[in-house]
Structure formats: C-alpha cells, structure tokens
Amino acid sequence: MPADTRQAASTKGASGQGSPGPDVPVIECRGLVKAYGDSTILRGIDLRIERGLTHVIVGGSGAGKTVLLRQLIALERPTSGAVLVDGQDITNLGDVALNQLRRKFGMVFQGAALFDSMSVMDNVAFPLREHTRLSAKEIRRRVLEKLEILGLTGADKKFPAELSGGMRKRVGVARALMLEPAILIYDEPTTGLDPVSSRNVDDIILEMRDRFGITSVVITHDMATLFRVAERASMLYKGRIVLTGTPSELLDSSNDVVRHFLRASGVRPEALQELASE
Amino acid sequence: MGGPPSTGQAAKRDPEERSHEEKRRNVALEVLLALWSFPRGPLVEIGMVASLAFSTLVWALRPPYRGRLLIAAMEFVGVQSIFIVGLTGTFTGMVFGLQLVYSLRQFGAENTVGGVVALALSRELAPVFTGLMVTSRAGSSMATELGTMRVTDQIDALATMAVNPVQYLVVPRVIAGILTVPALCMLFNVVGMFGAYVVSVYLLSLDPGVFVARMSWQADGADIMQGLVKSAVFGGTIALVACRQGFYASGGAAGVGQATTRAVVQSSVAILVLNYFITSLMTSL
C-alpha cells in the first residue's frame, strides 16, 4: 500500500473528520501536565511532531520520556493540557473512539512486548487477525514479507524466548507495521543492545521513514541514535522541553542542560557531527 | 501579686497554648487516619473489582465476540480443574460420611447420613470447596499470567494495537468462571455422594437403600440449584479478583508474586463471605 493511500485511509478511519491540512502537525501537545499524586512528572509540555519527519525526544532517566510517550498514544490521560492527533483533541475520547484512533499508531516497546505465548508468526499476524478479514493465506504472505524486509526470514516459527534482543526488537517493528500506521513510536529502541545491533535498529528506523513515509517518534537517551536518525529533536529535562530543533541546533546550543547532557553522553561533538552529517 | 498577668507573660503563654492545641489536633487527626486505614484498603479493593466488573459487562456486550478465547478459557478453568475437584470431592464425601456415621450412630440416627451428606454437599460444601480449589489452581494462574503481561508491557501492547485489554483478557475469563465453576460444583456433588456412599455402605455397613432413599428425600432440586447459583457467583468473583490483581500488577517479578498471593487470599475470603450472604438471601426467599 503506498504511503499516501495508507495515510488517507488511516486518517479517515480514525478521526472521521476528513484529512487534516498539510500544516497541521501529526501530534501536538499543548501545556501537557501529568502528575501522580503529589509527584508532577510533566510540567507543561508544548511540542509539535511534524508530518513525515523522524522526531527524537531525548532526556535522562526520570526526565519523563516514557510518561510523555504514554500521553501521546493515550495510554494515560493527562492531568491538564491537551494532546492533538491530526488536529483532533484525544484527551477526552471514549474507549471506542480511542481504539479507532490507535489504529493510526504503531508502537515499538522497549522490551518489544511480544506475546510470549505466541510464535513470531502469530505475534506479527495478530493486528491483521484482529482488524481485517484477510484470509489466513494472505495474512501469512504479508507476515513473511514483513519478516523478510526486517531480516527475520525463517524466524516465523520461533517463540520470543528463543530470539535475541535485536531480533525481538525487529519482530516488534514488524508487528507495529502490519496495520501500516501513519505514526510509529519507538520507546528506547536501542536500550540493552550492542553497538552493532543498535546501528541495525537505527537503520530500520530510517528505512521505515524512507520506504513507507512514516512519521516516527523516537524516545531515547542514546545520543548516537539521536544523531543518526533525527530530523527534529527535543530535549526533555525534569518534565519540561528545554530545546527543540535540528540535531545540529542541539549540538550548537548554548543551553546548559543540553551542553551538560552532550558532555555526559561521552561522545565527542565531532563524532556526533559526523553521525548527523551521515 | 495576685493581679492579672502582665502583657509579656500572656504573650508567652499564648504560643504555648496554641502549640498544645495543635498537638492535640494532630494526635486526633492521626488517630482518625489510623482508624480509617483499616476499612480503606478493603473498600478500595472492592471498588476496583466493582469497576472492573462494570467494564467487563460493558465490553462483554460489544463486538467482536471472541468465541475461541472463551473456549480456551473454559478449557483452562473448567477441564483442567476436573481432576483436582474430583479428587477433593471424593475425599470430602468419604470423610464426611465417615464422621457422620460414627457421630449419628451414638443416637441411633445413622440412617439419616445419606440425607445430611446430600444437603451439606449440594448447599455448602460443593460450591465452597470447588470455589477454593478453582481459586488455588486457576485464579492464581490468571493473576500470574496477567501480571506478567502487565509488567512486560504486553497489556499496553494490546491497547496500542487497538484491542481493548479488558475485552480480550478479562471478559473470556470471567464468563468461563461463571459457566464452568457450576459444572465443576455438580461434579463435586456427584463424586462426593459417591465417596460418602462407598464409606457408609461398604465400610460401615449402612443399608444402601436407606442411604439413597434419605438422600433423595431430604435434598431436592432447590438445594442443588442453591449450590449452582453460589458457584456461578464464586466463579465470576474468582476470575474478577484474579484479573484485577494481575491487570494492575506493578513492580516486576516481586510485584507479580504479591499480586498472585493477594488474588488467592482475596478470592478465598470473598468466597466465604459471599457464601454467608447468598445463603442468607436464598433461605429468606
């Protein structure tokens, strides 16, 4: 399915409000606040994720990255503020409308979140079996095609426990792609992987953008990933976005928090510049 | 001497009195909070189970209807519990028959054993023991499975794939509990009566005709129905409590273990408490 067809079908099916204009960001956060009891994690996030770009949200542990991600895909409701997807406020959507909306999204979890009682084939086929009336043969064909794209040929009969960390992540990506979503969200995609596997996952993120025109949101604390895949980047610090810009702008920033984070990442600025220019 | 205190003394005493007043208030507040903490926990739990029960009802009525998941859940809760319930039922009937024959023989009333066993089994023992066995086998397993799915993000993954986790995970288990526990209760009744019959007639020489006649004379369809209604309520409660604990588990492997323990304890207590209230309600009807 071509990217533009997929986008239109997805938008129509999910919002029922027709296609949004090209200037409307895919996701927009306005004054997003999230508190658990007395503990405030997000303290007024304003963020725009532009269509077709790979936007990396970077921040240290405890900065609120995962909490922000859970608001973006409406796994939790914010304490105040709003999240708009294609211009539609999703903050107070009911369960049925939320289910419709979520078909626009694909999500790759930190630990892949594969169903451990199912084989790779059943895991990847799951969204198609739930949401389409395709024949078993057609579902199998599509699953095998996706597995081949992601370098997982022959892994369809294996169970998640038999896979390496990198393979699990790729199966997670395959599953997230099955409904051909307009937006793909990656939660810490390279955490726990060796440098080579990390590089492979970064390549997959880039390939998803180039091949399917998907808008990607990547949550990470890995600066190498940021400079390899990002077209836009936001720095999250103590529940606030302290800077949004291109990776180069991030590198040249005089913001103390950004400079400290870059220094602490242990990667030389020249090396990061190299990655950005790649 | 003996006159009103000077302004300086009054000003010194006022803060002291205020301080004592505040301490008294704080102590009273702490006592009230401590007293409230006793019913608070159970009330919160009951509220969360009730909320999950409501969601389950709503999502059970909405399509898609997942027949395969329901059959798999019934196989897990019902079929896989047959052996343990059958074994428990047989030995419960046997020991009950044994005790009753010895006790009632002292008054020359051993002929009533068949009737007493039938009544006790059908009204109380079968539903309660079946419920407790299903709790320990299936309830604990449900809580562990869902808890593991929660802490490994599998439940969130379902939600992000536009599949409602309550509809996919909780609805089939609760319906399976409601449908299969009464069937297991009937099994308990049958094997329990058989166990009591074998002990009473073959080991303790009771007249088989009298045993069967008393059994059918004293226990009727209403008694069996009472047990079945109870076991259906227990089945739904076991599944709801287990799913609630698993569904909201947190804290990794330790958290899943604690959720499982809580599921078993809460289900067992709920069965015993509900048993009294259902009995009270049904006998007053």
Image (spheres, rainbow, N blue to C red):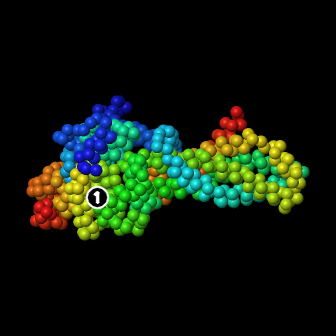
Residue A68 in the image: state x and y as whole percent.
28, 48
B269 or A251: which is nearer to us? Answer: A251
Q: Residues within 10 Å of mark 1 (few under 14, many from 20)?
A: many
Type of amino acid under label 1: Glu
Quarter of the C terminus of chain A within the rendering: bottom left
Image quarter for residue A116?
A: bottom left
B165 or A106: which is nearer to us? Answer: A106
The residue that appears at 84% across and 61% down in the rendered structure is B203
Residue A63 in the image: state x and y as whole percent.
26, 53
The residue that appears at 72% across and 44% down in the rendered structure is B224
The answer to whether one can see residue A36 in this image is no
The answer to whether one can see residue B175 in this image is yes
Say what secondary structure mark 1 lies in. Answer: loop
Residue B242 in the image: state x and y as whole percent.
52, 51
Q: Is residue B38 left or right of residue A240?
A: right
Residue A163 in the image: state x and y as whole percent.
38, 67
The residue that appears at 50% across and 47% down in the rendered structure is B66
A164 or B151: which is nearer to us? Answer: A164
The chain letter under disc 1 is: A
Quickly name the residue at label 1.
Answer: A188
Q: Is residue B85 left or right of residue B107?
A: left
Q: Is residue A204 left or right of residue A250?
A: right
Whether A255 is drawn above or below A9: the answer is below
